[in-house]
Image (tube, helix red, strand yellow):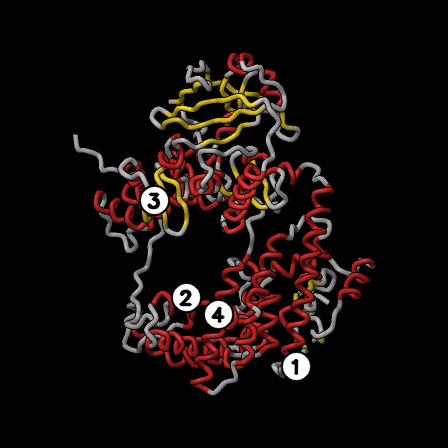
């Protein structure tokens, strides 16, 4: 029988046993490839993804900054606190979520000892909990009732847990009856722990995130890893206004809402506190924005008038069947409109749904002249699948190929990226046996230059050499091509022409960066960032990048970008400002264009990042949504 090829997971587990200190991720990537060679374009990609999601499951802790630590090193000697609830104290059953992420919820080779080193007999069990929304459900637990009674544990007591060894996983339990000492050292430990957790959650772009990917790295890096004496990490998270604990194992920021929040009664006090803090932060930022805009006007970078073309939205009259484009008038952005906005809010003149619709519509789609059918949403997923039996069959075939462990992970995760990762690992195995489930790809022959290949430029704008063979259509195509081209040229709108000119400028900028010694990746990233402003200018003003100015860039960065660009982020905002600054410096040398407005906006890059961050914290279901929205994006919402 042929020997099975080792998997990436099995190799990572083996390698973890060979190290006893921090190691560079790249070294591990290379060692995995030595045992499992890959011909993939990016051979590190599969290994990177496996470590990104649940590194602890393959024996590692991902510290960040390209560093890894073997899980056995991080856990051996580690100490944490468990705070059983009243029901657990009464039944002697300890929920296994208390032990997470230090102990896997499915780990069964577990040994428990008391403070004297005596074995603690226990059994695996479960606790039935009752949820007001979903009814009763069971959660895994361990029965240590005899030990609890022997140690005289009562409500308010806690348990200090120390990981003695990894194989088998051995935990020493020590009952702690004394009130938690709030010494300076304990307070420092707790603060470092919760700040480390919050920092990792806030910087994650995939929420909610497993506590294993957050809590383990913080403990692993801490000087107090083996002497921790503070409250449990779960208690710290529950009491931190920045964070939210979900099902005892997932972490998110406080804007995350569970199904219970959606269908149940949301505590108005939670909304009130969060929204009040958010509004205060928005007011501080708005004062800074107003001051910066006035300074720019004093420097004669603009006259302070915001044209606000991107505020346009389409209103449909159900009686007449006609549509009307409604656009706010230009406004003096050097004035403070806080009082006027509050007055309008009191009168109910702001429509919550109107702003929601503004977010759903996209000027870029309008410029592309797409029909509504092209952008239709799936309102009834069951009906959609029922009409497509081949889709249902393919989905069942995919699910049938999953292992019980993968199915369990699918049910337990709420992270869309991990769901994609779990399913994607099966695709390459299904392709040879079931090719009919996959789309047939049409071969594409790229041009000799790679200058067009930066971060998703519209393919219709990419140049094609005259002598390229695109297809084997009959001679009638060639006979009619010139006439067709003329007809196509006549159909180009001013928006299309502006975008085409911007594309040419971006091509030259890309070539300029390469000539300056920048890598292709850097050049592609910097040039790709420009699409946001180029699309904005073409769609709403029929202007090219060469016609950019302070007024339109302010509108793009402080109103359009945070709301309309799906992958906007504080870091992305800063990178965008940097790319724009470099591009207009290039245009200054090539076309003698005044680039002062781009340099001034680069100095405001942190303000753009804060707008993005604050917008992400606004919950559309909040009763204060309209107030938060219009205040954050003033004066464009006035």
Cα separation, mark 3 vs mark 4, equals: 34 Å
* Pointer 4 residue: 578
**Marks 3 and 2 close (CB-CB < 8 Å):** no
Mark 3 surroundings within 10 Å by alpha-carbon count, few (fewer than 14), some (14 through 19), many (20 or more)? some
Cα separation, mark 3 vs mark 2, equals: 31 Å
Callout in the foreground (3, 2) = 3
State the quadrant of the C terminus.
bottom right
In the displayed structure image, the side of residue 245 where residue 1 appears, left or right? left
* Pointer 3 residue: 22
Residue 337 shows which numbered tag? none
For this rendering, which residue is in front, 275 or 533? 275
Residue at 51% x, 79% y: name it.
544
User: Which element carries disc 3, helix, strand or loop?
Assistant: loop
Q: Earlier in the sequence, mark 3 or mark 4?
A: 3
For this rendering, which residue is in front, 593 or 485? 593
Q: Earlier in the sequence, mark 2 or mark 4?
A: 2
Q: Earlier in the sequence, mark 1 or mark 4?
A: 1
Callout in the foreground (2, 1) = 1
* Pointer 1 residue: 298
Callout in the foreground (3, 4) = 3
Query: Extreme front residue here?
Result: 184
**Residue 446 location, x and y as percent?**
30, 67
State the quadrant of the N terminus.
top left
**Residue 533 location, x and y as percent?**
52, 71
Cα separation, mark 1 vs mark 4, equals: 23 Å
**The quarter of the displayed image where residue 373 is located:** bottom right
Cα separation, mark 2 vs mark 1, equals: 33 Å
Cα separation, mark 1 vs mark 3, equals: 53 Å
* Pointer 2 residue: 525
């Amino acid at each position: 029988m042929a020997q099975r090829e080792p998997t990436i997971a099995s190799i990572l587990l083996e390698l973890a046993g060979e190290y006893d200190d921090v190691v560079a991720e790249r070294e591990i990537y290379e060692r995995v490839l030595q045992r499992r060679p890959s011909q993939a374009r990016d051979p590190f990609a599969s290994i990177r993804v496996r470590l990104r999601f649940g590194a602890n499951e393959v024996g590692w802790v991902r510290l960040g900054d390209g560093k890894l630590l073997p899980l056995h090193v991080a856990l051996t000697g580690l100490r944490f606190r468990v705070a059983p609830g009243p029901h657990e104290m009464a039944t002697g059953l300890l929920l296994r979520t208390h032990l997470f992420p230090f102990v896997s919820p499915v780990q069964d080779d577990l040994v428990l000892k008391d403070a004297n080193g005596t074995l603690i007999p226990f059994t695996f069990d479960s606790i039935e909990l009752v949820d007001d929304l979903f009814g009763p459900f069971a959660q895994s637990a361990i029965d240590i009732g005899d030990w609890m009674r022997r140690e005289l544990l009562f409500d308010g007591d806690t348990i200090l847990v120390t990981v003695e060894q990894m194989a088998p996983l051995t935990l020493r339990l020590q009952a702690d009856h004394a009130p938690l000492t709030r010494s300076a050292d304990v307070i420092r430990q707790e603060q470092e722990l919760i700040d480390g957790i919050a920092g990792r959650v806030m910087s994650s772009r995939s929420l909610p995130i497993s506590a294993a990917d957050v809590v383990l790295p913080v403990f692993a890096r801490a000087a107090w890893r083996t002497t921790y004496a503070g409250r449990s990490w779960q208690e710290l998270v529950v009491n931190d206004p920045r964070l939210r604990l979900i099902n005892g194992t997932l972490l998110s920021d406080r804007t995350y809402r569970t199904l219970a929040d959606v269908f149940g009664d949301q505590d108005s006090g939670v909304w009130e506190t969060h929204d009040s803090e958010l509004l205060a932060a928005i007011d501080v930022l708005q004062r800074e924005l107003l001051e910066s805009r006035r300074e720019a006007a004093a420097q004669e970078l603009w006259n302070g008038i915001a044209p606000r073309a991107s505020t346009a939205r389409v209103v449909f009259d159900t009686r007449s069947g006609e549509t009307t484009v409604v656009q706010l008038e230009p406004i003096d952005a050097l004035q403070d409109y806080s009082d006027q906005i509050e007055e309008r809010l009191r009168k109910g003149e702001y429509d919550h749904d109107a702003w929601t619709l503004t977010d759903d519509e996209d000027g870029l789609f309008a410029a592309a002249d797409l029909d509504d059918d092209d952008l239709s949403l799936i309102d009834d997923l069951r009906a959609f699948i029922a009409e497509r039996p081949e889709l249902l069959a393919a989905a069942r075939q995919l699910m049938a190929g999953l292992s019980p462990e993968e199915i369990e992970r699918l049910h337990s995760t709420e992270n869309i990226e991990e769901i994609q990762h779990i399913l994607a690992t099966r695709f390459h195995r299904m392709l040879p046996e079931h090719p009919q489930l996959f789309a047939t790809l049409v071969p594409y022959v790229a041009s000799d230059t790679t200058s067009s290949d930066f971060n998703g430029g519209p393919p219709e704008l990419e140049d094609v050499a005259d002598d390229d063979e695109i297809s084997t259509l009959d001679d009638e195509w060639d006979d009619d091509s010139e006439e067709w081209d003329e007809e196509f040229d006549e159909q180009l709108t001013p928006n299309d022409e502006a975008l085409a000119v911007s594309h040419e400028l971006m091509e030259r900028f890309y070539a300029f960066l390469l000539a300056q010694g920048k890598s292709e990746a850097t050049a592609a990233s910097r040039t790709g960032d420009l699409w946001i402003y180029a699309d904005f200018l073409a769609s709403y003003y029929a202007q090219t990048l060469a016609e950019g100015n302070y007024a339109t860039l302010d509108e793009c960065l402080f109103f359009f970008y945070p709301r309309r660009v799906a992958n906007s982020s504080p870091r992305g905002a800063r990178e965008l400002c940097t790319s724009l600054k470099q591009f207009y410096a290039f245009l200054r040398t090539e076309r003698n264009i005044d680039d002062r407005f781009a340099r001034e906006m680069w100095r405001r890059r942190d303000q753009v990042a804060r707008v993005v961050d604050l917008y992400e914290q606004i919950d559309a279901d909040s009763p204060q949504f309209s107030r938060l929205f219009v205040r954050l994006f003033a004066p464009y919402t006035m």
